[in-house]
Image: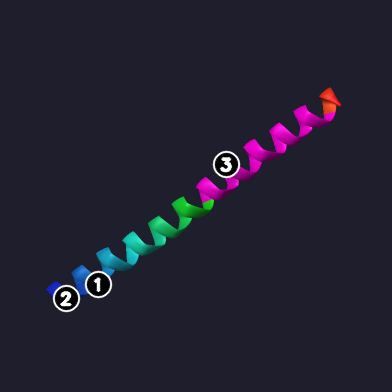
Amino acid sequence: MIQKIIFALVAGGIVFSASACNTVKGVGRDIESVGQAGSNAIN
């Protein structure tokens, strides 16, 4: 029983970590696109 609970917590942690990583990547892409748009507007 305890092993199932531990497994569920570990699996949930992995899923949460993976989704957080994707969110950070998306924010990085958004910031990069804003920088590129500003650079294009200046030129």
Q: Is residue 9 above or below residue 3?
A: above
The residue labelled by disc 2 is: 3
Q: Residues within 10 Å of mark 1 (few under 14, many from 20)?
A: few
The answer to whether residue 28 is above or below residue 2 is: above
Q: Position of residue 4 (x, y in %)?
A: 21, 75
Mark 3 belongs to which amino acid? Val
| Mark with earlier residue (2, 3) | 2
Q: Quadrant of the N terminus?
A: bottom left
Q: CA distance from mark 3 to mark 1?
A: 31 Å
Which mark's residue is nearer the viewer, 2 or 3? 3
Residue holding disc 1: 7
Left or right of 12? Residue 41 is right
Sequence-wise first label, 3 or 1:
1
Residue 43 circle label: none
Relative to 26, 10 lies left or right: left
Residue 2 falls in image quadrant: bottom left
Q: Write down the residue under mark 3.
A: 27
Tell me the amino acid under the disc marked 2: Gln
Furthest toward the front, the residue is 43
